[in-house]
């Protein structure tokens, strides 16, 4: 018996999984898929180098704040978050009833796709790429995200650098980055940032796939939202639902294939992407590495599982 489905002939509701509470996740009432991007080990430059990891408590990722509760807002403030970077397009925000202002946290609208890049027609095209059975379509969509969202990435990263210069200890206030589910747009940029910081590929892939657990409690909501929007109309109900579920998943092979292409195009740590596409200088790239790298052993297991 599948516990996630109701029992035939009864009114019993399916059992939904709880939001993960193990690191790097944080339970934020009203937010799903919320976690710290820090803690992952960084590749040693030599066998004698001091172990280091990505700085914790500085960049958080997750879903949109549409359903966040007052307690959830308080949790964000307790984490020291001062800025909320919203990657959604205007059309998405309007369809969910607008955005939510949170006391003490500045909202910065940095859409990945502009007006022309997020039409209903283009959205349907991306749905097909996200939900395809192979990786060609979704990787193509990921690359589109990387190019379209380069100005957003520039804004976020240069702001971190400028804020660090204004801080007494050189550490800027924490930021929260999100799209709708915190899966694809947010996930792609976080993965590229971890690559730039020289986090090994296996950890980057695992970090990306954590969205499966992060979205599990609300997956049914996202699937119902996609179905209501008419996603994959023309297919039978079972196939429509299957494709929608794939859209809100995070498959390891998709990230592995993206990293392969990024390395081929822009170098082993993706430096070329940040210089040539995002527009950062070499000094800014090295400044980000210095800001986001701290000494100490990184995470080698998540939820008790050795990676």
Image (cartoon, rainbow, N blue to C red):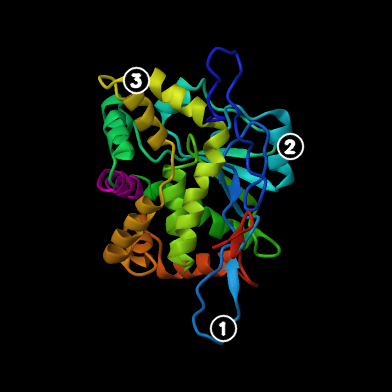
In this view, the mark in front (2 or 1): 1
> Up-down: is 43 above or below 239?
below
**Dot 3: what SS?**
helix
> Up-down: is 270 above or below 37?
below
Write down the residue under mark 1: 49
> Who's the residue at 57% across and 27% down the image?
66
Front residue (pair 165, 99): 99
User: Relative to residue 84, is residue 240 drawn left or right?
Assistant: left
In this view, the mark in front (3 or 2): 3
Task: Give the CA separation, mark 1 to mark 3.
Answer: 55 Å
> Who's the residue at 47% across and 28% down the image?
222
Q: Earlier in the sequence, mark 3 or mark 2?
A: 2
Q: Does residue 141 belong to the magenta stretch?
A: yes
Could you tell me residue 93's position as x and y percent? 47, 27
**Dot 2: what SS?**
helix
> Who's the residue at 55% across and 27% down the image?
99
Q: Residue furthest bottom?
A: 48
Badge number at residue 74: 2
Number of residues whose C-alpha sits closer than 10 Å to that of mark 2, classed few (under 14), some (14–19) or many (20 or more): some
Could you tell me residue 95's position as x and y percent? 45, 21
Q: Earlier in the sequence, mark 1 or mark 3?
A: 1
Q: Which residues are magenta?
A: 135-147
Write down the residue under mark 3: 237
> Who's the residue at 60% across and 80% down the image?
50
Number of residues whose C-alpha sits closer than 10 Å to that of mark 1, classed few (under 14), some (14–19) or many (20 or more): few
């Amino acid at each position: 018996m599948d516990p996630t489905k109701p029992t035939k002939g009864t009114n019993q509701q399916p059992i939904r999984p709880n939001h993960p509470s193990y690191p790097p996740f944080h339970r934020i009432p009203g937010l799903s898929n919320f976690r710290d991007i820090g803690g992952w080990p960084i590749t040693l430059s030599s066998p004698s180098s001091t172990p280091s990891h990505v700085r914790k408590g500085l960049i958080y990722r997750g879903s949109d704040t549409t359903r966040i509760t007052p307690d959830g807002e308080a949790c964000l403030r307790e984490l020291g978050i001062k800025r909320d970077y919203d990657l959604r397009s205007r059309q998405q925000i309007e369809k969910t009833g607008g955005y939510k202002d949170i006391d003490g946290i500045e909202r910065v609208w940095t859409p990945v796709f502009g007006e022309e890049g997020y039409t209903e027609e283009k959205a349907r095209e991306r749905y097909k790429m996200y939900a395809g059975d192979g990786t060609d379509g979704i990787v193509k969509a990921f690359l589109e995200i990387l190019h379209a969202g380069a100005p957003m990435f520039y804004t976020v990263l240069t702001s971190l650098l400028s804020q660090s210069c204004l801080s007494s200890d050189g550490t800027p206030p924490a930021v929260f980055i999100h799209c709708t589910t915190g899966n694809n747009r947010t996930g792609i940029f976080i993965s590229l940032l971890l690559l730039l910081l020289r986090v090994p590929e296996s950890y980057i892939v695992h970090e990306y796939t954590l969205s499966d657990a992060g979205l599990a409690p609300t997956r049914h909501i996202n699937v119902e939202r996609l179905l209501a929007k008419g996603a994959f109309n023309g297919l039978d109900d079972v196939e429509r639902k299957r494709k929608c579920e794939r859209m809100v998943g995070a498959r390891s092979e998709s990230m592995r294939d993206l990293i392969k292409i990024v390395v081929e195009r822009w170098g082993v740590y993706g430096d070329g992407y940040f210089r040539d596409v995002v527009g950062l200088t070499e000094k800014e790239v090295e400044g980000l590495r210095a800001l986001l790298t701290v000494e100490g052993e990184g995470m080698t297991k998540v939820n008790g599982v050795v990676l």
